[in-house]
Amino acid sequence: DERLFCGFIIDLTEKKKNEAEVQRRERLVTGILNASVDPLIQINSTGIIQTVNNAACRLFGWTMDEFLGSNIKMIVGKEHARMHDMYLKRFLETGVAKVMGKKRELKARRKDGSEFWVELSLKEVETNDEDERLFCGFIIDLTEKKRQESMILKRQRLVEGILDATVNSMFLITETGSIVEVNKTAIENFGYEKDELCGKNISLIVGGGHAANHDSYLKRYVQTGEAKVIGKNRELVARRKDGTEFFVELSVKEIVTEEGDERLFVGFLRSLTQQKAYEAEIKRKEEFSEKIIESARDALLVIDKDRWIKRVNEAAVCKYGMTRENLCRCCLDWLLVADDAEWLKTEIGQYLDVGMPFTEDKELQAKHSDGSWFPVSLSISELKGPNGEVLFVIFANDLTMAKKMMQTEVEKTAAEVLLMNVLPESIAMRLKQDPGHIAEHHHCASILFADIVGFTTMSSKMEPKQVVEMLNELFSIFDDIVDSYELNKIKTIGDCYMVTSVPSKADDPHDDCLRLCDFALDMIQAIHDYNVKFPHYALNLRIGMNCGPVVAGVVGTKRFLYDLWGDAVNTASRMESSGIPGRCQVTKAVVELAGDDFVFEHRGMINVKGKGEMETFFIEKRAVPRKGILGNTRKMDRSQKKNGSTLNERSRFSLLQSLKMLEMAISESTITSSNSGPPGLKPGLKTMDSLLVEDRVDELDEFDELDESDEFS
């Protein structure tokens, strides 16, 4: 009936104490693990997670409960996830450690699926249980490190790109001169490969005999700190791989490293090849320009805005008769007359104030060192000085010779005008080109002589001036008619007027004859019109004409005369002397040559002095009407001569002298009234040559129409 109980008591004090210690240690380990900033994960031999710390939870985004009991593949990147168990199994079987005990970078995966770089340090945990093998992995997040590395890499690539893109060669060397780094430009400019330069001494590229001393220069700087090249730009000679040398500009700077235990120097070498070539070209052009300026015939003066001379050329030295030094101490005003100096001052002032253009080729009076003056033509242009100051370039063209040449040309032109009045134009041009003898044969020339009936008696009762005025007026009318038909007046002998068709531009004897026949009828009409205007003279003409072969040429050396010779000329003269006043008597040769264009009146056979019996005719009229040429011809011709005159005062003086000579000759004729000239000439003037001046009288009426303000070219 009694029930008894027996209790066995074990003292747990030590056990509890041990358990408490274990718990304390576990808490301590857990605390330590959770206090670590780096994630820690412990797995077993099958890859199952046994332990994780808070840092792992924070980094990967899973909770501790989600971690524990899960396979480690959950945090391995996709690239290695499926192979992870195989890696672990192979280690357990073979003991070959490819990762164990080492650090390795790989990609890990967060709970959200994003991957990132980590550094894994994996070690096996020693346990007392041989059947259980544990592995502990320490993980370091490399996200920030990779970002910084990427940034550094980008910067490094950027720097390398900049250095390679620069046009200057770059060399990075140590304090002993050993090349550490070069850029792409250095490789291209010097012809080396990068491996051929790096590690070599920088003296490899030094030329000009400085290679042997380069290291001593660098050593002296390192020891003394005395910079002769460091921090400065210097020109020196560099040497390429092929041995050729070229000029470079070197800029060297010292690079201070953070460690401070290494001294580096970077040098940039800019090739001066193009610059030297450009400088040589500029120098060549400057020397060429200098030669041009110095060889210029015009004086060149460079002045400032106050007109002080800054530079001159050799021509200026010669023109002004002063040395360069003395000229460059002068103000340009001192070398000009007062009025011209004032003009120059105003001209430059207006240009600077309002931008008024300079006057082109202004003619001024310049002063020579000997006190003489000479004319110059000034042209001015602005020039920017080397320092930006306003300068002016002045070209002074000495007009002394030009004015002399102009005067010579004017006199030459006047002489040509007079020559044209004395000789036919074509003959005058030939005489200019070839002053030798001019003689030619014309197989059929038309010749006309006209004589004023009773002129000797009439002129003896007139004043010399009246005679000249009458002849000038009448012969000027005839001259206009001659020009209109393109005929040539040969000469006037007293009151006798001789015209011919040669030299002829058309070279058509028939047409020449017709034009001379027209001229004869127009002369008769002209004398009729003259009598209407001046009825008190009651003038009349006797005209003779013939056609035939002649010899023509220029005679004389001082006073040229174009004349005709031959029987045809004598016959034409006889036709005039044996003719009837108011009619033009012609030979049968004229009738045959004129053909049906004119109507002729048959006069019959007459006794001609020196020729005997000859059949003669009178020109009656034109069978085919031809347009007349009188009217405003003379007036128009005067206007043309006035507007285009090339006569100067010297020519006028010559013409006036001619008038006096003619007046004297006519006065003498009124006294002598005898046949004192060569046979065949009418009574009156002594010689034919003395009357050649009458041709010049044609110009006198032109001067009557000009007032004193007119200028002669």
Image: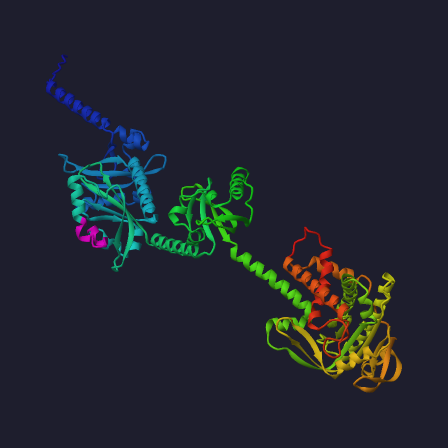
User: Which percent across, then down, holds residue 250?
Assistant: 27, 47
Foreground residue, 457 or 38?
457
Relative to 397, is 214 on the left or the right? left
Location of the C terminus (image quadrant): bottom right
Residue stretch rendered in magenta on the structure: 201-214
Relative to 163, is 46 on the left or the right? left
Location of the N terminus (image quadrant): top left
Foreground residue, 698 or 123?
698
User: Which percent across, then down, holds residue 205?
Assistant: 23, 53
Which of the 4 image quarters holds residue 5? Answer: top left
Which of the 4 image quarters holds residue 34? Answer: top left
Q: How many marks?
A: 0
| 497 is higher (above) or lower (below) than 198 | below
Foreground residue, 568 or 366?
568
Measuring 18% from the left and 24% from the top, which residue is drawn there?
28
Measuring 14% from the left and 36% from the top, which residue is drawn there?
126
Q: Which residue is the extreme one toward the top?
A: 2
Foreground residue, 18 or 409?
409
Relative to 433, is 68 on the left or the right? left
Q: Is residue 235 visible?
A: yes
User: Which percent across, then down, holds residue 263?
Assistant: 20, 41
